Image (tube, rainbow, N blue to C red):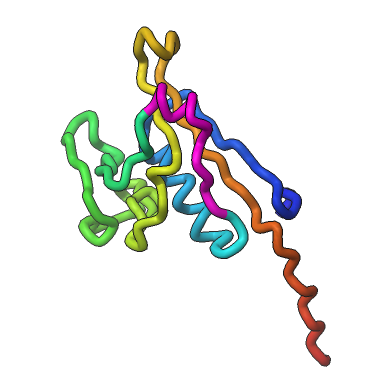
């Protein structure tokens, strides 16, 4: 909402956990559908990284003890107890998460792993909403 028309926002984490990376991007794309898109990273960044993930599993709250993971939200019998939300899972619509970039720890990158996604807001100005008659 604060991003100007045609503006760009870079979302980055020092994590490679898809729940903190791709899932957050997918949720933002769904919430602001038609207003923001992911854009391709510059060539130098693509050369040093791998594309964002299209699928992943989500661990349950007791993962440390049970090693329970879920592939789909529908597989979670008790989401509240498992501390799992639908937005943690890969989007069913195949959002273009491959445009995001995963920088894996390596000599060429000379850092720990991190994730970057570039959002761009539509340059088109939407007409103001017509107030409802009361």
Looking at the image, which residue is at 48% across and 53% down? 27
Q: Which residues are magenta?
A: 37-49
Looking at the image, which residue is at 81% across and 83% down? 131
Farthest-out residue, bottom: 133
The picture places residue 122, in percent across and down from the top left corner, at: 65, 58
Residue 75 located within the stretch drawn in magenta: no
Relative height, residue 30 to residue 61 (above, below): below
Q: Which image quadrant is residue 110 in?
A: top left
From the viewer's perspective, is 91 left or right of 13? left
From the viewer's perspective, is 43 left or right of 2? left
The picture places residue 65, in percent across and down from the top left corner, at: 19, 31
The picture places residue 30, in percent across and down from the top left corner, at: 49, 60
Q: Quadrant of the C terminus?
A: bottom right
User: Depth check: 19 or 111 in front?
Assistant: 111
The picture places residue 75, in percent across and down from the top left corner, at: 21, 57
Relative height, residue 104 to residue 93 (above, below): above
User: Depth check: 132 or 42 in front?
Assistant: 42
Q: How many marks?
A: 0
Residue 42 located within the stretch drawn in magenta: yes
Farthest-out residue, front: 43
Looking at the image, which residue is at 36% across and 46% down? 83
Relative height, residue 99 to residue 42 (above, below): below
From the viewer's perspective, is 94 left or right of 111? left
Q: Quadrant of the N terminus?
A: bottom right
From the viewer's perspective, is 126 left or right of 25? right
């Amino acid at each position: 909402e604060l991003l100007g028309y045609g503006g760009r926002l870079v979302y980055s984490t020092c994590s490679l956990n898809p729940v903190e990376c791709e899932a957050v991007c997918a949720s933002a794309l769904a919430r602001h559908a038609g207003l923001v898109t992911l854009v391709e990273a510059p060539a130098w960044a693509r050369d040093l990284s791998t594309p964002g993930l299209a699928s992943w599993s989500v661990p349950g709250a007791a993962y440390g003890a049970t090693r329970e993971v879920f592939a789909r939200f529908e597989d979670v019998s008790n989401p509240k107890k498992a501390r799992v939300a639908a937005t943690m899972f890969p989007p069913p619509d195949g959002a273009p998460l491959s445009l995001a970039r995963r920088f894996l720890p390596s000599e060429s990158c000379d850092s720990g792993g991190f994730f970057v996604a570039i959002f761009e807001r539509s340059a088109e100005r939407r007409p103001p909403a017509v107030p409802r008659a009361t």
